[in-house]
Amino acid sequence: MPYNLKEVMNKKERLTPGHRMCAGCGATIGVRAVLRALHEEDQAVIGNATGCLEVSTYTYPYTSWEDSYIHNAFENAGATLSGVETAYKALKKRGKLGDANFKFITFGGDGGTYDIGFQSLSGAMERGHDMVYVCYDNGAYMNTGIQRSSATPMYADTTTTPVGTVSNGKMQSRKDLASIIAEHNVPYVAQTTFTKDFRDIHKKAEKAIYTEGACFLNMMAPCPRGWRYETADIMEICRLAIETCYWPLFEVDHGSWTLTYEPKHKLPIEDFLKPQGRFKHLFKPGNEHLIAQFQDEVDRRWEDLLYKCAK
Amino acid sequence: MSMKDRMSGNEAVAFAIRQINPDVMPAFPITPSTEIPQMVSTYIANGQMDTEFIPVESEHSSMSATIGAEAAGARSLTATSSCGLALMWEELLVAASDRMPCVMAVVNRTLSGPININCDHTDAMGARDTGWIQIYAENNQEAYDNFIQAYPIAEDKRVHLPVMICQDGFITSHAVENIILNEDPDVKDFVGQYEPEEFLLNPGNPVSIGPYAISPYVMEARKAQEEAMENSKEVIREVARRYREKFGRGFEFFEEYRTEDADYIMLIMGSAAGTAKQAVDDLREKGIKAGVLKLRVFRPFPASEIAQALSPAKAVAIMDRTESYNGHGGPLASEVRAGLYENGSSVKALCYTYGLGGRDFTVERVYEVFDELKDMIENNKEFRQHRYVGLRTNSPEVR
């Protein structure tokens, strides 16, 4: 079906307004985009790891979720949805659900996905439950107040890797989770974020939801609080992440790696770093070599990705 | 109709699971409960049941997936022991506070360290305040009978709480004993169909489960759980009576063994109750009026019923197969004595820790305990309130 932004945007919201997420939060933009990929006739069960999204969208006695929704804990969104999905299989088999059709999507931040929930995610992927795990990656534990995670980029200033007189922020570069999950040999893995027409995220979410088996989406979801950029600039931040190749868009469909967007002119990493307060210290005189190191790491990973995509 | 057979405790519980044929079972192996998921998997592999088994990657995930499946509207269960139970501790609280009527077969084993695979009650006792109903078995027969009663208790609308069915690791789980099994249709009829009111997969009726709640709501939610636990007392009794009417076996909160005229009563839980009963028979031969109160239900805690049963005695021994490090005994010591106090009973009590890490608890040890109770009453001898029995030392200072 050809993609039509206007048509897609006119679909009924499945995450309703009135929740308590920050203005300009990337997570809710991303969640709504993923849920728009659900076909209207399909019901869904949404899972959620503990995090901003959970505490702000299901604050008793109110829920923002139009579909069935379950939050269990921080580290077990993968395992929890495996239970739900298996229950679906069991009840279907025993004729208890009639012809109802359910899809299973779970959301977790990078803390609940890359770190504390990594084992649970890996187990769910390996067992091949028919579900989509969507990581909204904002590169730190934002809910508890911007602590570093294994998704935090190198040199970011976080509250547990603070920049100080003898510290330049986080010392390690980020874990490449999309590749790690792809190495689980699941049917579909994609990395995405927000583009002007939201086509990339829509197409990938739709593919993930409607591909049988365990699928994984790694979605960069900027956090204006943690990244310290002007709230209104989120789309520009995402564009710069893509154009600098900091956040490449790709998919791994049944083992086949494809670059879904290739910048015509790769921009220098400074363009992505500059608008963000968390990298402010990198632009002090004398820290040029840190930016050069950051650039080297981006280049190395980009080349590696091109190789995987046989470019 | 019933069938006579010989089985271990694990076999008996797996047999009950096959008869009930629940919807979903996530599980992860841990000694000594490993056989339960193995046997269930074998039943499934041979087409003798069609439960969906999830071979999860940890016990934290087995309880997480059990909650997910139960929330989705499926009758769910898991099995574990020791460190596995400890790993899922957070999830035990979630299961209870989300009011999930799921069931867990617990095969009691000690917790590290030193690491040891044998029986004591440290695992389940560590989970006593998680909001789960806990029912303990003396032998394979009771493990089987208790398991069949678990869902009717958990799923009762007055309760809606998860249930742990506990048996002693190796002593019960691996020892083969005679057993009477019920016919499949009778078990299915007794347990009935699960009809959840609200669940994730209810077509056209979405529901949200597991909210964040601010302070104005948390205490009320907890109070509702506490009321459900209190309500479960009546339900446990009803289910036990119904079971006894149908199958001719079982007790309600506890079994009273030769306590009617007893001067000395030992309160004990699990497999060691069998040993205690043997010792009581021996002592009765010698004219010592000894008895055993074998506690079956630890949560909800039947405090007033216990107090009533113990009060006529001259002295009681409260036996804990775990340590609480509070200086006066284990959880039974604390809770039984609180119950006695609350009910105005002034019966004398000594609290014992026994059988840790699989240490044998023999009839000789039971004699020792009764000797001390007798010595305390007849000779006014003073004993330290909390004592160890069966330590490899004779020094009274150490005990």
Image (spheres, helix red, strand yellow):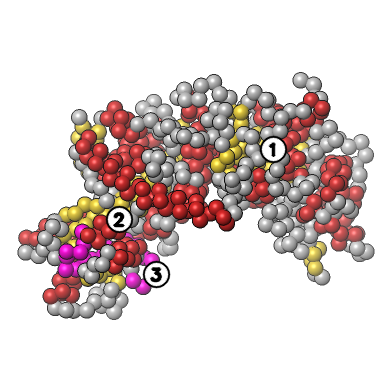
Q: Is residue B90 left or right of residue B312?
A: right
Q: Is residue B306 above or below residue A79?
A: below
Q: Which residue is mark 1?
A: A16
Q: Is residue A54 above or below residue A252?
A: below
Q: Chain of mark 1?
A: A
Can residue B51 be spotted in the picture? yes
Q: Secondary structure at mark 1?
A: loop
Q: Secondary structure at mark 3?
A: loop
Q: Quadrant of residue B333?
A: bottom left
Who's the residue at 32% across and 36% down the image? B16
Q: Which residue is mark 3?
A: B325
- Range of the magenta residues? B309-328
Q: Are marks 3 and 1 in contact (CB under 8 Å)?
A: no
Q: Which residue is mark 2?
A: B302
Q: Are marks 2 and 1 on the same chain?
A: no
Q: Are marks 2 and 3 on the same chain?
A: yes
The crowding category of the residue bearing disc 3, from other C-alpha atoms within 10 Å (few below 14, some 14 to 19, many at least 20), is few
